[in-house]
């Protein structure tokens, strides 16, 4: 006889209870939508606000003026002077800029080839000198490395040995009218060499206290996200050649053969007989707003290179399909060109107060519209040279052209398999190289679309979402090469969306339109920027309107905290808790974000308020720490921040103690600079402010 064995069954509920009781790994506190962000692609047309995971708003900045208040900036905020390549070793010029009270640091872009002329043999001397100069003035440097389009004295910003190793490339005309090489940024050989360089740079410069941030570059031209090297318009013939060119064209006109002469006129007007990229009209999304006066109607045109403005493409970026070009069109396309701490007792409140979310995280339903962006080509036609023997006879026009952009776009798409989806995955790959190399130093990412049109906007949304939801405040966001104050929702919504999560900023182009400075002083505050990179000509401008606009931005850039009142009892019994109250106001456009590392992500959290008790000799005896009821990362401009706190006190000796307040990151011991209002019209700036005294009695 077989004995029947008794089987024990356990319910699913019981198993669940057991599993919940077991300790598990600590995970970053991302919400479900954030966790899934970088695993699932964003739906098509994600640049429209309806498909975003939070409402993106353009809010009117609320100005608060306090008599006697002066600008107070912290190391990561303020103005940074953009130093062009040819002036980066000019010590006196850099020092003169850093000596300015309103300049918090400098911004530099260097070619890769200068730093690694031979594989694995690095020359850091130029960057070291820049950092040493900044260190003398105790100021910061924003560092970016270019792999294409910066140094016209080189064939490419990318070292020659990279191409010799087999990296693919494409030719383009630089601003000097000469041919240069752009690496195919998604080529595997190029990426392997670039990754090695970034890791070597991280080994040397990670944790360098003089670096503000390191640009996430190497995936586009001039340290940006853009992949089309459309820098200039090229005209083949010079004045001395025009007569011969005219004769050649007349002969061709009278001939029987339908051949194309080496100099061919290419019309640039829209609809001139070839496919144009899809219109951006459908890419212009609407936005909710809290003030009619802040609604902006025009989209800002792209500024892919410093001092150059690229016109928007037409319809090509919206479709994977193209009509087969004619033989004549192919011939035209082949020649188009481009683009420290004391040991004292510290008492901390048991639990920090519950935080509140400052940004709504629900699908948007209603938005205000902004008009479609448009850009005019100042050049109506160009001559394109198809004859290699006379290719040096070129003239550089003042603007890049739509035709150049389109032809380069087609070449990259046809010959190098470029697609909108591929560019998103490419930029995610490049972006992931940097956090692995720089564990402590902040990074900086350009929020311009890789290509123009709706698909480019969608790609930018997915890339920026991936970076911020995965790495948080480790990555700052910069809108590079801003050429004017047009404030389209498309161009600036990434800053509007994420300035609650990380620091954001502008980089102004050298040819920024001075007439737009007043308007810029408004939109910079609406966008919540924490830093602005300024070209030297704007910093030194004697134009009063420019000076006034910069002063306005500087007075409200980043977070500018003012302690208006701290209430303490004049006496208390030894060991009894102290009932205190605090009143602050933020005069700045951004909130005070304190990064806390959770796995590979820096979450934006609150700083703590510290009260330090010093004895009659000025020696710190005790420090009390607590998190404000309203976390500092939610201190919005214009809103009074008031709370009460009961401070736990240890058994101190009876006597009188002076009390000093600071706002501090308890992990790094970094203290914020802020203003302390002593009386109306009199404010003190510093990191430790005297707030009164307490007499402890038995």
Image (cartoon, grey):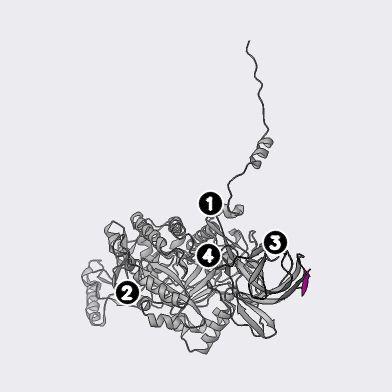
Mark found first going from the N terminus, 3 or 1: 1
- Residue 675's disc is none
Real-space CA distance between mark 3 and mark 1, rounded to the nearest whole angstrom: 41 Å
Horizontal relation, residue 251 to residue 599: left or right: left
Which quadrant holds residue 297? bottom right
Which residue is labeled 1 in the image?
Answer: 40
Mark 1, Cα crowd under 10 Å, few <14 / some 14-19 / many 20+, is few
Return the x and y of residue 158 as percentages of the image width and height. Answer: 33, 64
Question: In the picture shown, does residue 22 fall above or below 482?
Answer: above
Which quadrant holds residue 204? bottom left
Return the x and y of residue 689 as percentages of the image width and height. Answer: 64, 76
Cβ atoms under marks 2 and 1 closer than 8 Å: no
The quadrant in which the N terminus is found is: top right
Mark 4, Cα crowd under 10 Å, few <14 / some 14-19 / many 20+, is many
Return the x and y of residue 230 as percentages of the image width and height. Answer: 38, 69
Judge depth for marks 3 and 1 and give the one in front. 3
Which residue is labeled 4 in the image?
Answer: 283
Q: In percent of the image, x 60 and y 64: which residue is there?
A: 666
- Residue 349's disc is 3
> Does the magenta portion include 585?
no
Mark found first going from the N terminus, 3 or 2: 2
Mark found first going from the N terminus, 1 or 4: 1
Q: Which residues are magenta?
A: 569-575
Q: In percent of the image, x 52 and y 89: which residue is there?
A: 544
Real-space CA distance between mark 3 and mark 2, rounded to the nearest whole angstrom: 68 Å
Residue 115 seen: yes
Mark found first going from the N terminus, 2 or 4: 2
Which secondary structure, mark 3? loop
Residue 301 vs residue 685, the one in the foreground: 685
Q: In percent of the image, x 37 and y 61: which residue is there?
A: 410
- Residue 234's disc is 2
């Amino acid at each position: 006889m077989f004995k029947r064995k008794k089987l024990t069954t356990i319910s699913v509920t019981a198993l669940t209870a057991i599993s919940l009781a077991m300790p598990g790994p600590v995970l970053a506190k991302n919400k479900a939508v954030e966790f899934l962000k970088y695993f699932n692609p964003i739906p098509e047309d994600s640049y429209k606000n309806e498909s975003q995971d939070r409402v993106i708003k353009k809010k009117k900045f609320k100005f608060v003026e306090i008599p006697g208040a002066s600008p107070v900036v912290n190391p990561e905020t303020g103005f940074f002077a953009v130093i062009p390549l040819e002036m980066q070793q000019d010590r006196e010029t850099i020092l003169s800029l850093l000596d300015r009270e309103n300049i918090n640091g400098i911004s530099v872009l260097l070619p890769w080839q200068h730093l690694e002329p031979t594989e694995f043999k690095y020359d850091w001397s130029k960057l070291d000198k820049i950092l040493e100069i900044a260190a003398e003035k105790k100021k910061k440097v924003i560092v970016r490395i270019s792999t294409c389009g910066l140094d016209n004295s080189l064939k490419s910003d990318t070292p020659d040995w990279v191409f010799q190793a087999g990296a693919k490339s494409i030719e383009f005309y630089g601003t000097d009218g000469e041919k240069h090489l752009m690496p195919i940024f998604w080529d595997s050989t190029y990426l392997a060499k670039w990754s090695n360089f970034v890791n070597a740079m991280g080994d040397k410069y990670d944790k360098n206290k003089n670096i503000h941030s390191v640009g996430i570059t190497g995936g586009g031209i001039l340290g940006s996200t853009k992949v089309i090297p459309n820098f200039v318009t090229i005209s083949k013939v010079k004045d001395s050649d025009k007569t011969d060119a005219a004769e050649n064209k007349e002969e061709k006109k009278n001939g029987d053969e339908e051949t194309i002469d080496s100099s061919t006129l290419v019309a640039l007007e829209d609809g001139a007989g070839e496919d144009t990229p899809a219109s951006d009209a459908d890419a212009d999304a609407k936005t909710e707003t809290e003030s009619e006066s802040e609604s902006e109607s025009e989209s800002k045109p792209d500024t892919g290179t410093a001092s150059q403005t690229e016109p928007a493409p037409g319809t090509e970026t919206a479709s994977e399909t193209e009509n087969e070009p004619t033989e004549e069109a192919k011939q035209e396309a082949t020649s188009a060109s481009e683009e420290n701490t004391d040991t004292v007792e510290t008492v901390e409140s048991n639990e920090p107060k519950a935080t509140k979310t400052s940004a709504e995280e629900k699908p948007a339903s209603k938005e205000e519209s902004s008009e479609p962006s448009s850009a005019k080509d100042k050049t109506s036609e160009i001559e394109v040279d198809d004859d290699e023997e006379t290719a040096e006879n070129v003239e550089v026009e003042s603007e890049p052209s739509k035709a150049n952009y389109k032809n380069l776009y087609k070449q990259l798409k046809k010959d190098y398999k470029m697609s909108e989806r591929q560019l998103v995955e490419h930029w995610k790959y490049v972006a992931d190289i940097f956090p692995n190399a720089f564990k402590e130093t902040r990074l900086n990412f350009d929020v311009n679309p890789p290509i123009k049109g709706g698909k480019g906007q969608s790609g930018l949304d997915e890339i920026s979402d991936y970076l911020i939801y995965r790495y948080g405040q480790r990555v700052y966001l910069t809108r590079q090469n801003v050429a004017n104050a047009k404030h389209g929702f498309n161009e600036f919504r990434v800053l509007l969306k994420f300035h609650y999560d990380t620091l954001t900023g502008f980089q102004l182009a050298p040819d920024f339109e001075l007439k737009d400075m007043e308007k810029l002083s408004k939109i910079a505050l609406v966008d919540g920027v924490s830093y602005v990179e300024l070209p030297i000509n704007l910093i030194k401008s004697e134009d009063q309107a420019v000076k006034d606009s910069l002063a306005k931005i500087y007075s409200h850039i980043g977070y500018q905290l003012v302690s208006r009142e701290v209430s303490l009892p004049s006496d208390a019994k030894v060991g009894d808790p102290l009932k205190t109250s605090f009143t602050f106001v933020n005069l700045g456009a951004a909130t005070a974000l304190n990064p806390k590392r959770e796995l590979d992500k820096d979450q934006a959290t609150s700083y703590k308020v510290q009260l330090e008790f010093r004895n009659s000799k000025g020696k710190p005896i005790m420090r009390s720490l607590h998190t404000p009821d309203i976390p500092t990362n939610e201190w919005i401009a214009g809103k009074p921040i008031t709370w009460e706190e009961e401070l736990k006190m240890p058994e101190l000796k009876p006597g009188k103690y002076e009390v000093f307040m600071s706002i501090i990151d308890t992990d790094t011991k970094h203290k914020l600079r802020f203003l302390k209002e002593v009386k109306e019209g009199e404010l003190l700036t510093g990191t430790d402010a005297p707030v009164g005294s307490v007499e402890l009695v038995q």
